[in-house]
Amino acid sequence: MLKAGDVILTAVQFTDTSEVKIRPAVVLFEELGNVVVAGVTSNLKMKGIPLSKSEGAVKDSVIKLNYIFTISAEMVYKVLFHLSKEKKQLIYDELCGRLGGLKA
């Protein structure tokens, strides 16, 4: 069972091509075998939340909250590590800020 804050390796289809590669992602939530994740990149020029090697990443990376997608739980190769409570709070706060326009 996957948990919010798990950093996983999964098959990812890129938005600009039909190519699929194995990449890290952060689990936002899982429900009925569907896993909503945010992509992770080692391209430090990208905007997002920093993720360092000292936190468990293979390389210093960025959690891209502008790249959220749904995968099947069957596409998860493995759980790499789990984010700290503080890092999960940063993700939550950033997502809430971006979704603020949906408030009635």
Image (tube, rainbow, N blue to C red):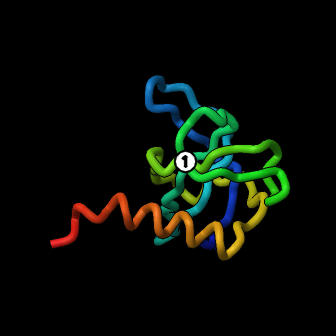
Numbered disc total: 1
- Name the residue at 67% across, 65% down: 6
Using the rendered image of the protein, determine whether residue 104 is visible from the camera's viewpoint: yes
Q: From the top left corner, tell me how far across and down residue 27 is, in percent.
A: 58, 62
> Does residue 68 appear left or right of residue 3 in this picture?
left
The quadrant of the rendering that contains the N terminus is bottom right
- Name the residue at 56% across, 66% down: 90
Give SS at disc 1: loop
42 is higher (above) or lower (below) than 86: above
**Circle 1 is placed at which residue position?**
48
In which quadrant of the rendered view does residue 55 lie?
Answer: bottom right
Q: From the top left corner, tell me how far across and down residue 63 is, in percent.
A: 59, 50
In which quadrant of the rendered view does residue 19 lie?
Answer: top right
Q: Amino acid at mark 1?
A: Gly
12 is higher (above) or lower (below) than 29: above
Q: From the top left corner, tell me how far across and down residue 36 is, in percent.
A: 49, 59
> Does residue 60 appear left or right of residue 11 in this picture?
right
Residue at the limit of the structure toward the left, as seen here:
104
The quadrant of the rendering that contains the C terminus is bottom left
Q: From the top left corner, tell me how far across and down residue 65 is, in percent.
A: 48, 51
Using the rendered image of the protein, determine whether residue 75 is visible from the camera's viewpoint: no
- Name the residue at 82% across, 51% down: 53
- Name the residue at 66% across, 76% down: 85
Q: Residues within 10 Å of mark 1 (few under 14, many from 20)?
A: some
Q: Nearer the viewer, residue 93 or 33?
A: 93
